[in-house]
Image: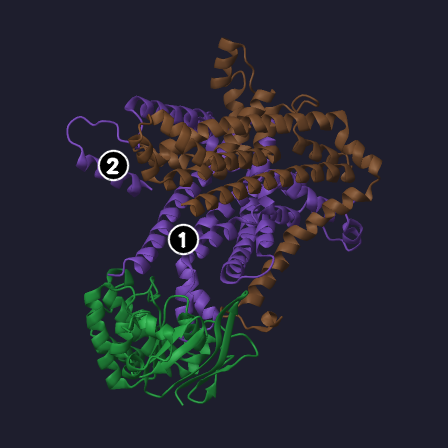
Chain colours: A purple, B green, C brown
Amino acid sequence: MGAFTNSRALASARHITGPLPTSARTEPAWIRTTLIVITFAFLGVFILWPLLTVFHEGFSKGFGFYIETFKDPITIKSIELTLLTAAIAVPLNTVFGLAAAWALTRFKFKGRQLLIALIDLPLWVSPVIGGLIYILLFGRQGTLGPWLIDHDIQIVFALPGIVLATTFVTFPFVARSLIPLMEAQGHAEEEAALTLGANGWQVFFRITLPKVKWGLLYGIILCNARAMGEFGAVSVVSGHIRGKTNTMPLHIEILYNEYQFAAAFAVASLLSLLALITLFLKTYSESRTAQQLREAQELTTLSH
Amino acid sequence: MGVQIRNITKTFNKFVALKNVTLDVQPGELLALLGPSGSGKTTLLRIVAGLEFADPGHGQILFHGEDVTYHSAYKRRAGFVFQHYALFQHMNIFENVAFGLRVRPRKLRPTEDEIRDRVFTLLKRVQLEQLAKRFPSQLSGGQRQRIALARALAIEPRVLLLDEPFGALDAKVRKELRRWLRQFHEETHLTTLFVTHDQEEAFELADRVAILSEGNIQQIGCPKEIVQHPTNTFVHDFLGLDI
Amino acid sequence: MFNRFTPRIMPGFGLSLGYTIFYLSLIVLIPFSALFTKTFSASWAHIWESISEPRVLASYKLSFGVSFLAALVNGFFGLITAWVLARYEFPGRRFVDALVDLPFALPTAVAGIALTALYSTNGPIGSFLFEHFNLRVAYTPLGIFVALTFIGLPFVVRTLQPVILDLHADVEEAAACLGATRWQTFTRIILPALLPALGTGIMLAFGRAVGEYGSVVFIAGNLPLKTEITPLLIITKLEQFDYSGAAAIGLAMLLASFVILLLVNLIQWWNDKRTAHDREEN
């Protein structure tokens, strides 16, 4: 995208000498400036300021207090639980995403569109519903509730419920980042590998996986960010047992509601840092994916 | 023997791409499938390679007498050169050519030294051994084409299939490579089937030419025969013969 | 008829599709079915009462009304942002571009407490607005509006950006050659081409806002009949062990999401048809 605008700017600069008249494809300078200022102002107030507030409030009682927050066993427990949950949910959804992308981009079959729509479903519903359905299924008065109680199995208000709800809300991320990419790449290389004698797994691991690695990374990063930060769905199924079933976002809520603002923002700053790293990796993997696609197109169209 | 194509029919949804096509490629022969776009020639080539399957219950494909009709592509050992080469972008040239050897079942897989020897012999053969460490994106079109051929030859194919092999090249390189391929064929006598829409190319390169239109073979014979005795008006018009 | 027996060219069809459907059923479809069975295990009277009692009706009005307003505002600023990012070169462009995605990446609870801290009457923005305009933001519907605007922005920008990049230069140049001013070119040529994407982006932001929970609960104040959003009511019902009531409200929200999804698809379908028609004419 940057290259695109740059080359256009260069192209017009080469043709025009002297004072620049407004080209046919852009606005007068004062309008451009106004629009850029509006963008900066809007994003500054609505997005950047809240982000900076997190760090500002987190350090409001000093660096020492900030560090102390993370020595609290209940905070540590919430971090552990968050990491554990993501460590289960993300790999599960990654395997699913790869399988779904393979099935949906390498084959044509009836109901393909419906399947894509169903995979998107968790993005469309409220995260609260994502938690609600597991309560309705596994809760005390849920469909399977009595059976679970008889067999002394606890799902909701315990780790399995938290993992399930997290898996639900992060369900489509990897699949959604892979499907358009694999669609765009086509499967000529996979076909070539087949004619050279590679079997299905060899095609997958040696050709497809290296080809989609940046897109896959992108999907995993988004999936992980959401898994660690999910609030609504997990809030419904967690039961809010302190030091036991509270993930980091839920712990933030408790600290906040108890007016321990600095501590709440300190924990929040850790999640914000994760979000910033996510954005950085996302931007990076996006540009790598775009580059890979460009090279692929060049390889097939400009073979001179 | 060679390649026998018997009564192959292929329909996509309701469109009939190939209608009961029968064709024998003699061992060691270089046969061109010539036809306008949409004539079914690429579909036929892909069916021979196992990249499409003909309509079930119709016809057979035999490689040197063996029925491969329902074999998957990866079991056929048919060397296929794709129109846009389909080189593996994330592998260097050496690894591209070595791929077919590396994916063999362990028992049949050559040792690392054997692979190295085999790959360099092939790269020498296509006169590109100095490019072994390069990646496909760093090669010219003509070089990519020859690497694609070397890669297909690495598996010691039973039959060589070329889909518009010169389609993406400019006129000069195209002429050079055409001559080179003919010479290569003289040396190896590998049974070869290639698809083209360029009649000059077909007539200059091939031992025999099969002319396809609307899923049917209109005429098959050596170039001279076809030019002198076109069997029907389609062939006549397609070749642009005068009167 | 025979198609079912045709072997597939690419391997792994059965395995990949089988696993996809199995996992989808396990995580999404089977749990979702509980939403239906639980709702309809109650009497119709109870279902009706659950989804139509005054407190719930007030929450619909609030959730849908404020979400829609926030989506519209995002439509306006999102269009400007997308245009600026796609067309102009200026220092900090890449930074701004990355910043747009922050609401996707930032956990909603973090956004919630940050916005509350900013907009409460002793926060920097909140105190300014209160002192100079006597405007309370946090713990009022206006606070909900702020949170939902934050959440929705990336949807509009990311839907519009690729479409703006894909606009054909020659059309704008042709308009200029025919004597159109830049404003005329924008309103008559560019805006109509962007409308479907703008509509889709607004609907996506709206859909997300209606279901949003984490960033809203902190800033909303959660007063029944005044600042209580629908997702919060589901949680309230669950806490009162009224499972079928919670399920009924959930189902109502699901229905609403479904209608929004349908609208988005309708916009896209209409646009595809329109552009396909253009192509034929050309």
| Residue at the spot 79% in from the left edge and 43% down from the top edge | C40
Residue B4 position (above or below residue A273): below
Decide: few, some or many residues near mark 1? Use Cα within 10 Å; few <14, some 14-19, many ≥20. many
Q: On residue A214, which mark appears?
A: 1
Can residue C100 be seen here? The reply is: yes
Determine which residue is flagged by label 2.
A9
Element type where label 1 sits in the image: helix
Element type where label 2 sits in the image: helix
Q: Amino acid at mark 1?
A: Trp
Q: CA distance from mark 1 to mark 2?
A: 29 Å
Q: Is residue A300 left or right of residue A144?
A: left
Q: Position of residue C76 (x, y in %)?
A: 47, 27
| Residue at the spot 31% in from the left edge and 35% down from the top edge | C174
Nearer-the-camera pick, B240 or B31: B240
Q: Nearer the viewer, mark 1 or mark 2?
A: 2
Q: Amino acid at mark 2?
A: Ala
Can residue B98 be seen here? The reply is: no
Q: Quadrant of residue A293?
A: bottom left
Mark 1, chain letter?
Answer: A
Mark 2, chain letter?
Answer: A
Residue C70 position (above or below residue C155): above
Nearer-the-camera pick, B111 or C251: C251
| Residue at the spot 54% in from the left edge and 79% down from the top edge | B58
Which image quarter holds the N terminus of chain B? bottom left
